[in-house]
Image: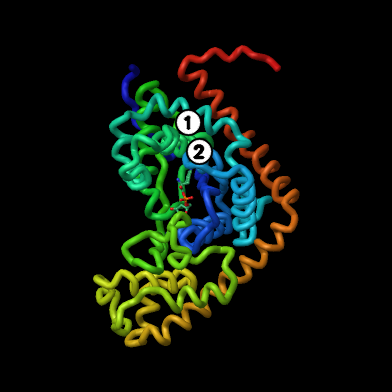
Amino acid sequence: MAEPVQTPQASFPTRIFSGIQPSGGLTLGNYLGALKRFVEKQDEGIETIYCMVDMHAITVWQDPEKLRQQTREGAAAFIAAGIDPARSILFNQSQVSAHVELGWIFNCIARMGWMSRMTQFKDKAGKNSENVSLGLFAYPSLMAADILAYKATHVPVGEDQKQHLELTRDIAIKFNNDYGVNFFPVVEPVIEGAATRVMSLRDGTKKMSKSDPSDQSRINLTDDADTIAKKIRKAKTDPEPLPDTLDGLKDRPEARNLVNIYAALAGHTPEQVIRDYAGAQFGSFKPALADLAVAKLEPITLEMNRLMQDPGEIDHILGQGAARADAIARPIVDQVYDIIGMIRSRRD
Ligand code: TYM
C-alpha cells in the first residue's frame, strides 16, 4: 500500500450532489429536510446535481410499474419545488452506470466493520437481518459512489443521513491513502435549518417517513389542502400552551416538531415562532400551521399534478440530465480504473 497522504480540500471546486429514493411518495420531511434546501443551493448559483436514486430503492422490493411512477413523481416534485433542469442536473441513477461501477469498487474499499455499524441498516433490517437483501447492507457504499462519482464536495441532507456521509468520508480517505493519491474530496455534510429531522405527526420521537404504515403520521406532497389541514388538526400534542422559550420545548417532542415545521415552512427560526406564539394553545396554533402548510404546499402539489399529465416530458428531462451527469462522472470513473490498475483498451 502507498504512503498515506493528506487531502487538501482547497483543490476541489464546490459541487453539490444529493439524492432521494423513489421508494414511495415524498413527505413533508423530504421537502423540508431536502428538496426545499436543494432549491436554495441551486438559487445560490452553486453547481447542483440531483438524483432520483432508483438503484437504492430496489434494496427492498419495488413493484416495477410503481417504481417508474414514483421516480417520475419524485422528479415532478423536484421541478414543482423549484429545481430548474437547465440550471441543475436532474436525473435518475440507473441511467448513469458510473454509480454502480464505482459502487462496486467502494464495496472493496469499505470494511465490514464500518458497514455493520450503520444504524439505518440495523433499523431497517430489525430482527430480519438474515433475510434482507445484500444490497440493503451494501447500500451506503453505493451512496458514497453517487457522491464521489462527481467529486461532489457538499451534500445537503436531513439528519438521518449523517452517518452515511461520515462513511463516505472514510471511503474517500481510505481510497486516497491506499492508492497514494489526492483524488476524492472529503465531503462536507450540509445539515442545516429548522427541519433537519421532521418527526411523525403521531409520535414525536419517530422520524416522519414514507414507509410508516400510518398515513396519518405524515404529510405527503400529493395530499390535498383538506387532507393536510385535517392531519395537522389531528396531530398528537400535549395539553400545555406553547412556552415562551425554546427551552420549554425540551421534553415536548410533538410540540417541538410542530414549531420546527412552522419555522421551516415560514423561513423563520424556531425562536421567532416561539416569540410570536408564546402562550398560544394548540387550538389556535394548529390552524395557523395548517394555513401556512397549505399555502406553501398546495402550489407544489398542483404543479406536480400538472407535470404528471405528461410523463414523456419528465422522462425526457431525466434523460437529458443523465447525459449531462454521465459527461461528468464517466471521466472520473475512468480515472479510477486507471488508478486501481484496470486495463481499458476497448475502443468502440
Ligand atoms: P431518503 O430518500 O430517505 O430521503 C431523501 C432526503 O430527505 C431527507 N429526509 C428527511 N429530512 C428531515 N426530516 C425527515 N423526516 C426526513 N426524511 C427524509 C433525507 O435525510 C434525505 O436527505 N440514502 C438517501 C438517498 C441517497 C443520497 C445519496 C443522499 C442515495 N444516495 C447521495 C445524498 C447523497 C436516502 O435514503 O434518502
On the image, the x and y values in percent for residue 202 come to 38, 68
Q: What numbered label is drawn on residue 146?
A: 2
Locate the C terminus by quadrant: top right
Depth check: 176 or 10 in front?
176
Depth check: 118 or 6 in front?
118
Residue at image location 55% in from the left, 51% down from the top: 46
Does the image show residue 100?
A: yes
Q: Mark 1 belongs to which amino acid?
A: Gly
Q: Of the residues under marks 1 and 2, which one precedes in the sequence?
A: 1
Coloration of the structure image: rainbow
Does the image show residue 185?
A: no
Depth check: 31 or 192 in front?
31
On the image, the x and y values in percent for residue 19 come to 52, 47
Locate the N terminus by quadrant: top left
In the displayed structure, would residue 300 be above or below residue 21? below
Q: Is residue 326 left or right of residue 31?
A: right
- In three-dimensional space, the C-alpha distance between marks 1 and 2, rounded to whole angstroms, equals 8 Å
Q: Is residue 221 left or right of residue 268?
A: right
Count of marks placed on residues: 2
Q: Which residue is mark 1?
A: 103
Badge 2 residue CB within 8 Å of ligand 1: yes
